[in-house]
Image (tube, rainbow, N blue to C red):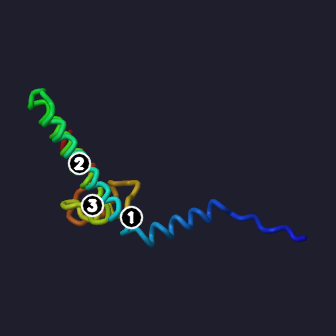
């Protein structure tokens, strides 16, 4: 009886994951966005109910609420601008490079980070 070829399980799984992510990426992004908004609404409502039923001073509670809103805004920004370029930065973060100085030098109309840092010396 001839030996059966070995099944390369790890490369097969990696290829399946890559195909899944490239094919259904918009659905994954939409699912993550909706899930994030749902959790954000729950957190804001929970914090509001806690503020309403608490007997503590309003100053500390408002500070905690502001921290919660900043946390939600940061998470929203990460999700909303995952595919599209950031306003004011453009497509600089679209294809990550290990040398950010090179990306700034190749962008038209921008100066290198070293030039900016040398101005502070």
User: The N terminus lies in which quarter of the figure?
Assistant: bottom right
Q: Determine whether, in the image, residue 35 is placed left or right of residue 25.
A: left
- Choose mark 2 or mark 3, whichever is in front: 2
* Along the line of sight, the residue nearer the viewer: 4 or 105: 4
Q: Which residue corresponds to mark 2?
A: 72
Q: Which residue corresponds to mark 1?
A: 28
Residue with the most extreme front position: 53
Q: Earlier in the sequence, mark 1 or mark 2?
A: 1
Per the image, label 2 sits on a secondary structure element best described as: helix
Tell me where residue 4 sits by quadrant.
Answer: bottom right
- Note whether residue 32 is visible: yes
Answer whether labels 2 and 3 touch (C-beta < 8 Å).
Answer: no
Which residue is drawn at the image coordinates 22% and 42% (left, top)? 46
Q: What percent of the width, then of the height, locates residue 17?
A: 52, 64
Q: What percent of the width, then of the height, locates residue 3?
A: 85, 67
Which residue is drawn at the image coordinates 32% and 54% (left, top)? 101
Task: Give the CA separation, mark 2 to mark 3.
Answer: 14 Å
Q: What percent of the width, then of the height, locates residue 103?
A: 32, 60
* Along the line of sight, the residue nearer the viewer: 5 or 30: 30
Task: Give the CA separation, mark 3 to mark 1.
Answer: 14 Å
- Note whether residue 70 is visible: no
Per the image, label 3 sits on a secondary structure element best described as: loop
* Mark 2 surroundings: few (<14), some (14-19) or many (≥20) residues within 10 A: some
* Along the line of sight, the residue nearer the viewer: 44 or 52: 52
Q: Earlier in the sequence, mark 3 or mark 1?
A: 1
Q: Determine whether, in the image, residue 32 is placed left or right of residue 50.
A: right
Q: Which residue corresponds to mark 3?
A: 81
Task: Give the CA separation, mark 1 to mark 2.
Answer: 20 Å
Answer whether labels 1 and 2 touch (C-beta < 8 Å).
Answer: no
Per the image, label 1 sits on a secondary structure element best described as: helix
């Amino acid at each position: 009886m001839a030996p059966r070829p070995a099944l390369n399980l790890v490369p097969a799984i990696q290829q399946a994951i890559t195909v899944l992510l490239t094919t259904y990426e918009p659905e994954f992004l939409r699912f993550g966005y909706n899930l994030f908004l749902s959790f954000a609404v729950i957190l804001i409502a929970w914090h509001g109910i806690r503020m309403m039923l608490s007997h503590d001073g309003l100053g500390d509670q408002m500070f905690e609420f502001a921290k919660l809103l900043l946390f939600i805004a940061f998470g929203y920004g990460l999700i909303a601008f995952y595919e599209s370029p950031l306003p004011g930065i453009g497509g600089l973060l679209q294809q990550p490079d290990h040398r950010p100085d090179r990306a700034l030098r190749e962008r038209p109309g921008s100066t290198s980070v070293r030039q900016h840092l040398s101005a502070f010396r």
